[in-house]
Amino acid sequence: MGELEEDRIYADTLGKTDVYVAAGLGVVEVSVSNDRIGQFSLAHRCPARDIAADGTDLLVATDEDVLAIDPTGDELTVERLSFGPAVAVGGADAPLAAAPDGTVARRTDGGWTELGAVSEPRAIDGPLVATADGVVRAGDGLEYVGLRDARDVLGGPTPYAATADGLYRLGPGWTHELETESFVVAADGDRVHAVTSEGLLVDAGDGWREREVPTDERLVDVGYIADGGVIAVTETGRFLVDPVAAKDGASGWRSRALGLDGTAGFAVPDR
């Protein structure tokens, strides 16, 4: 059996996840099947500053506008949402976006409703916004919910915030999970991953421990694929996958250089 045919059957059996990476060149699609980092290609050329999944669609913050991308058809469809330049985007009940001047707005009825302004917006997830002044919740307006110097947020059932003072979990009240400087946080069920000044740390329900990665480059995002594997990307576009079970029986990370400058992160839309 040829390698290409084997790859196709293997992907069909284990399931393929399409990951979309935001970089200075644009949005790059990367196909991942278990431990295999497959084909990658430029899906849309734009100066991408941030990217988020919005159901089966993608939201992309660029230097010119917020884009809504539908990757489900034979060809991607791209819609400009007339927000203007953006540095962060997120999908909640409706898309949220933050402008370079700190203005935060929600997409409603085909337009944008301004909710207020923050200092140095850095990331959006669900209703939460990470800012230089801490964490803000977007509702009818913007509500400060604590902390300072937030770099990333997770607005799921159990909210987290990565800050200069460490990683926090919202309880009621903020619980200090890690005291080391934190930059990125991701969670999937009982697993939580944090990119910190001490490396990539993981808590799978039995306490925090370091997960070594095969690169000294700075990780800018971490997340998960359909079969439960962990994925990450560096600022220079090196893509990594830590599979649940590798085809060849070998454990550990696989990696592939995508050759991208200015990598900001990735998104995995619903299938």
Image: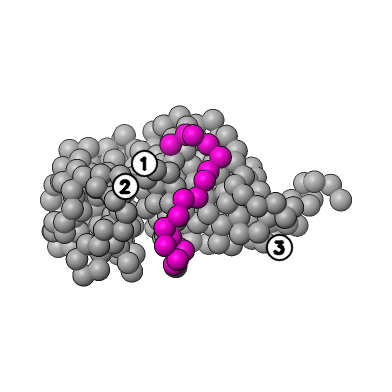
Magenta stretch: dominant secondary structure? loop
Mark 2 or mark 1, earlier in chain: 2
Q: Is residue 141 left or right of residue 242?
A: left
C-beta proximity under 8 Å, tags 2 and 1: yes
* Crowd class of label 3 (few under 14; some 14 to 19; many from 20; radius 10 Å): few
Q: Is residue 238 left or right of residue 124?
A: right
Q: Which mark is residue 254?
A: none
Query: Which residue is the site of mark 3?
Result: 13
Badge 2 amino acid: Thr
Q: Residue at x 39, y 33 (%)?
A: 47
In this rendering, the label closer to the viewer, 3 or 2: 2
Q: Secondary structure at mark 1?
A: loop
Badge 3 amino acid: Thr
Query: Which residue is the site of mark 2?
Result: 180
Query: Which residue is the site of mark 1?
Result: 197
Q: CA distance from mark 3 to mark 2?
A: 40 Å
Say whether residue 43 is visible.
no
